[in-house]
Amino acid sequence: MFLRSGPDWHLDTAGVHTIDAFLAERGITAADATPLPRDLYVEYVEWFRRGNGIEPIPVSVARLDRVSSGAARFLATCENGDTIAAASVALAVGFHYFRHSPPALTAMIPPARLAHTCDCVDASAMRGRRCLIVGGRQSAFEWAALLLEAGAAAVHMTYRHDTPRFAESDWSWVPAVVERFAADPGWHRRISTVERDGYNRRLWEEGRLKLEPWLVPRLASPALTTWPGTEIARAVDRPDGLDVTLTSGATLAVDQVVLATGYKVDMSRIPFLASGNLAGEVATRHGSPLLDDRLQTSVPGLFATSFAATQEFGSFFGFTVSARTAALLVAGAVAGRALTR
């Protein structure tokens, strides 16, 4: 796959370890890296990590508790039994815990025949299988391309809207908008609803009403059938497959249903929060955390960014372009010890 964003969506707040610098060091031109391949971006992240001396601890946190022991406010218990005491914690958990599987579909389709794109990451497992993708935006069409290239026998797509057009998205205006948060964190809250909706609408138009043109040749297969303006009305599980009836009346025989149905923030679904004494302490609205201007939750010293911050800070924070601004806001709060409301 390729990223939809360009080299200006880099990670370095100092502007040194940028994607442009990474490409230049390897003798790769911007034109040769457009669109930016996922694997090349992963290489950039590793280059950024090494260049900044970042040494991640390769364990998962099983439980996070609030404590009152000296300078420590929190105690993280890892899956291997180790513990980490910290004065501040930043939750940058991305999307995985928030995958959205519509209840109507999970009630209708047997678990063995149902997967979310977030979990269904081995496309080779679909070789020779008949697949139905639920969803019709960029992620869904990317998955269609991957399944076709993996040798799926058939790929169907059902979605309730018209097929988005294949056109290159314009993200050039986004970095300046996001960088504004660093200088004036509360600006997005102060603007009118009309202006805020305008930003969100523009993001929607670029990200949801367009499909990247590089997908076109990868979707040119007789094995692909799209069913715009439809959804699943009924599904019957049989020994040889799943009989799916769409609202259009069409009946499909498939082996696997893949949900490209997006994500919804719900802080209660983060396992290490749910298992610790912080469960229920983080104030939320519609599942998303309430945040101050420095991305701090209602629990002093506990910050949340990435997708979890989109309700309070706007859809921009669901994209990697927000990483630099989020780092500045959280680091500024911690350095200034602005940990009370």
Image (cartoon, rainbow, N blue to C red):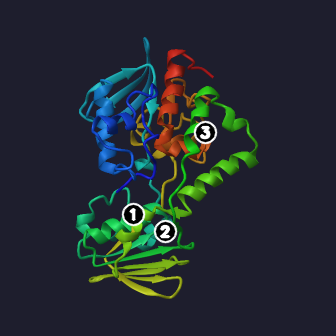
Q: Circle 3 is placed at which residue position?
A: 177
In this view, the residue in front, 44 or 181, is 44
Residue 195 horizontal side relative to residue 152, left or right:
right
Q: Quadrant of residue 224?
A: bottom left
* Residue 39 screen position, x and y as percent: 29, 48
At 63% from the left edge and 23% from the top edge, which residue is drawn?
A: 341
Which residue is most to the top?
Answer: 70
Is label 3 in contact with label 2 (beta carbons under 8 Å)? no
Instruction: Give the secondary structure at mark 1.
Output: helix
Separation of disc 1 and disc 2 at Cα? 10 Å
Instruction: Give the secondary structure at mark 2.
Output: loop
* Nearer to us: label 1 or label 3: 3
The amino acid beneath tag 2 is Gly
* Residue 50 screen position, x and y as percent: 28, 28
In this view, the residue in front, 42 or 91, is 42
Q: Is residue 207 above or below residue 10?
A: below
Instruction: Give the secondary structure at mark 3.
Output: helix
* Residue 316 screen position, x and y as percent: 56, 44
The amino acid beneath tag 1 is Glu
Kindly identify which numbered label has been placed on residue 136: 2
The crowd level at tag 3 (other Cα within 10 Å; few <14, some 14-19, many 20+) is: some
Q: Circle 1 is placed at which residue position?
A: 142
At 38% from the left edge and 38% from the top edge, which residue is drawn?
A: 19
